[in-house]
Amino acid sequence: MLPKLFLRKNEEFRIKNGHQWIFSNEIAKIEAEAGNGDLVEIYDWKNNLLGTGFYNKNSLISFRLLSHGKINDLSELIYERIQTAYKLRKELYPKRNSFRLAFSESDFLPGVIIDKYNDSCVLQVYSAGMEKNIDLIVKALDQEVKAVNIFSKNEEFFRKLEGLPAEDTIYLGQMTKEVIDDGSVKFRIDFEKSHKTGFYFDQCDNRAFIERIVKGKKVIDAFCNSGGFGLHACIAGASSVTFLDSSSNEIENVKENISLNSLETNCEFAVDDVFDYFEKALQKGISYDVVMIDPPAFAKNKKSLPIAKKGYEKLNRLALSLVNKDEGFLVTSSCSHHLKKEEFIDMINTAAAKSGRTVQLIHFNNASLDHPQLPSMEETVYLKFAVLKVSKNKSV
């Protein structure tokens, strides 16, 4: 029999409506001892069963829901969830062999992200419960996905929030290099040197979209990482592409990926702080037809949001100022969950006003289709992506 967790009065409505977390201040008591990562059953204050999930007394997120009923076989449940997630990705991207296979709570696998790179699966584990049952995940990936290599590439920040050690683990096979295809562009992935799990799958659909606006254009891809947006601009016939990143290692990755795809577009490369580069370019009178910015998260938590907003506004103001005076495009993103869509759009509007530009929003999107969202859980939405037509200020 599993330990029972009881909620305070009137704290059951959010989880009944589809949210998957219970916070520590919402718990009234727990009957019987439960260790971190153990399965527990959760009840409302009237002793009605609400579901079963993982418990962690050391985390602000004390309970992560797995099922609205009882769980008879955890191994079978995890296998079915991975099978279902994998089937969805194959339906969405039938010609691809690399994508985000499981997106944590959005695929009802709380606290674990799985990215598939050909025959390699890279995990990020941010739940004590998933960490405790990692062998079940590895077994499911081995049997259902036929993964040859399974290893983790965790972020220390999120592991610490859950009270988990920061080290990575090779569960099966080895940490190899891979060459993946996002549908039209090939990328060489060196897991030991790369960020996150190795590649940003969340922007794949958005990279494909920019191909509509770059033909014959002078383009800059700032915070280019491995060159995703810029490479798609090359494929789509941009006249020139400047790749800008503060990491010399990433610029070398871009050069390798250009060679890998046999691209002949006129390319330039710059290793510099993006803010500094933009300011220097403005001083020199340099401009671009399409400015693309995909910065890292400026707001890791709610406390840092006010400063992050100022950073995003300055970045977008500089980017808008770099767009050709007659007309052009700004492609801009934010992966800060705490910056909401409305705030993101307001920030762009403020930046446009300060830069003296008129903007028209022609496309807005979130993460790619392999990052499903739960309408009941805003935490599953984080990426904001906008494409704006930029022109001179027009009198009304």
Image (cartoon, rainbow, N blue to C red):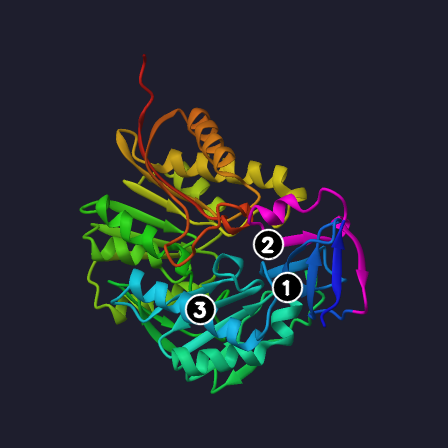
The answer to whether residue 197 is visible is no
Which range of residues does the magenta coloring cover? 8-33
Instruction: Find the distance from the CA under tag 3 to the CA under tag 1.
Output: 23 Å
Q: Which residue is mark 2?
A: 20
Query: What residue type is disc 1 on?
Result: Gly
Q: Which residue is mark 3?
A: 115
The answer to whether residue 54 is visible is yes
Asked if the residue at tag 2 contacts the one at tag 1, i.e. Cβ–Cβ closer than 8 Å, the answer is yes
Sequence-wise, which precedes: disc 3 or disc 2? 2
Query: What residue type is disc 2 on?
Result: Gln
Instruction: Find the distance from the CA under tag 3 to the CA under tag 2.
Output: 22 Å
Which mark, by number, is residue 33?
A: none
Query: Is 239 left or right of 319, judged from the image as shown?
Result: left
Is 23 covered by the magenta stretch? yes
SS under mark 1: strand
Counting labels gives 3
Quadrant including the N terminus = bottom right
Q: In the figure, residue 264 lies in which quadrant?
A: bottom left
Residue 34 placed where, x, y %? Answer: 77, 69
Instruction: Find the distance from the CA under tag 1 to the CA under tag 2.
Output: 9 Å
Sequence-wise, which precedes: disc 3 or disc 1? 1
Residue 35 placed where, x, y %? Answer: 76, 71
> Label 2 crowding class (10 Å Cα cut-off): few <14, some 14-19, many 20+?
many
Reply above or below: 298 against 61.
above
Q: Residue at x 71, y 51 (%)?
A: 44
Residue 351 placed where, x, y %? Answer: 46, 30
Q: Which residue is mark 1?
A: 53
Q: Residue at x 59, y 61 (%)?
A: 69
Residue 56 placed where, x, y %? Answer: 72, 64
> Label 3 crowding class (10 Å Cα cut-off): few <14, some 14-19, many 20+?
many
Asked if the residue at tag 2 contacts the one at tag 3, i.e. Cβ–Cβ closer than 8 Å, the answer is no
